[in-house]
Image: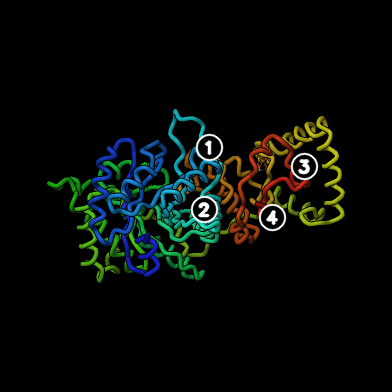
Amino acid sequence: MTNPLRVALAAGRFCYVVELVASALTREARLLETASGLARLPQVVAGSVTSYAGGAMGHDPLRVAAAARARGLTPNIHLTCVSQDRGGLRKTLDDMHALSLENVFALTGDYPGAGDQPPVFDLDSVQLVHLVDELRRGGKAFHVTVAVSPFKYTEADCVYQYVKLEKKIAAGADAAVTQVGWDARKLEELKRYLDARGLRTPLLGNVYVLGPRTAERMATGRPPGCWVSPELLAAVRAESLAQDGGRQARLERAARTVAVLRGLGYAGAYIGGTHDPVQIAWIIRRADELAPRWEALAAELRYGPAGGFYLSASAPRPRHPRRDALPRMLEWLGRALPVTRDTPLRRALARVFAWIDRHRPAAVLLEHVELAIKKPLFGCQACGNCVLGHLEYVCPQTCPKQMRNGPCGGTDNGRCEVVPDKPCIWVAVHDRAKASGSLDGLKTYVPPPHRQLRDTSSWINYFLDRDSRPGPGGG
Ligand code: SF4
């Protein structure tokens, strides 16, 4: 069975993917009617079926996807890390394979809203791509799309998004879709970032058909990672006073954005905010007409914040203070007492920890001692699978989504999506890495922890090679 998404991207033919929001609010029959309409548009190569959009349960994406395909629309299924452990994710991928559903959009997912069970985030999105790639190497055909947000306006948020995209690509991502945003400079920045590194991964730009209600919501930073500037909000409000409620103006903005994407060399557009086939067809036609004017249109698509961070800005980067004392001291200790490779000291300590491990009371005492030291220093949560040394001595378990490979797309100017009055932990990781000149180290893949090690001593697990850590044999 051919996969039009894969084929169009491989051929370098500008293509369209349209988001089908499989939320509980949309009748499934209606979604499928839409799928039939979209299947009649040759430029639309896939319908992207959401799962858990906005942090709430919707229709079963696999059922919707299979039904959409039966109506002629190739599905691209959102697979999020929310509330599924790695066994559940593997099972979903196996089910997809059994149904010959090839396209997977691998996402971390939004944090569930209040009132839900405490969420499981067993894997992060980079680890999920690894999992899909592992299955692919086992002979199961998958085409993996990932997300990236160039619309981050602080240095740490922005740089980490790009670093994380590189990790996803290294893990096996086939294509990337941007977060929603209305800033051509950022769209260009992302494209240049990949080009400068020789990364040819196709990019699809998110083109959201923005109405007044969604604009009001996004102006407050909801859903996480989506942001509408005051200027854009004012424009949308003004448009909505027109007789058609601003419909024509928002379709025109979408078509202009598509024209800009084409001019910048994007591989396609990912359309959200409408899945009405008539409107999508209009956007496609109008974008074709506008294509020659893309540079002028890009100059108008400038809804970033004043003073926001751009990688390409010629102004010197702000200097960071000296590195924190604690990571410096721990690193010095690590050099003075080498245990990360096979040394006499490591062998001696391994014997000591093996003895402790065999004597339960001693092992329990060590667990308490370790926690008593690490909790006040790092907020340790006794995962038993420590990777502090790989993350600038910031504990990944203090991230509400427990990610190990960088921030999710929900950060807001360096603030956490889940606890907005707290800084995102990955800002500290970035800043410390930058201060020590080791930003490249952030590209290291950190595998998921072994959950069965929870509430055991990570020191024992480390010396007895039970844990999971970066590097050969570390998975
Ligand atoms: S990574 Fe695990 S062991 Fe290390 S500080 Fe965090 S919770 Fe504790």
Comparing 208 with 350, the one in front is: 350
Report the amino acid beneath label 3: Ile
Reading the chain from its start, which is encountered first: label 1 or label 3? 1
Reading the chain from its start, which is encountered first: label 2 or label 4? 2
* SS at circle 2: helix
Q: Disc number at residue 120?
A: 1
Q: Compute the Cα span from label 1 to label 3.
A: 26 Å
Q: Residues within 10 Å of mark 1 (few under 14, many from 20)?
A: some
- Can residue 250 be seen? no
Q: Compute the Cα span from label 2 to label 3.
A: 31 Å
The residue under the point 18% across, 53% down is 248
Q: Compute the Cα span from label 1 to label 4.
A: 26 Å
Report the amino acid beneath label 2: Val
Q: Residues within 10 Å of mark 4 (few under 14, many from 20)?
A: few
Rendering coords of residue 111 (x, y %): 46, 39
Residue occupied by mark 3: 460
Rendering coords of residue 434 (x, y %): 60, 58
Residue occupied by mark 2: 132
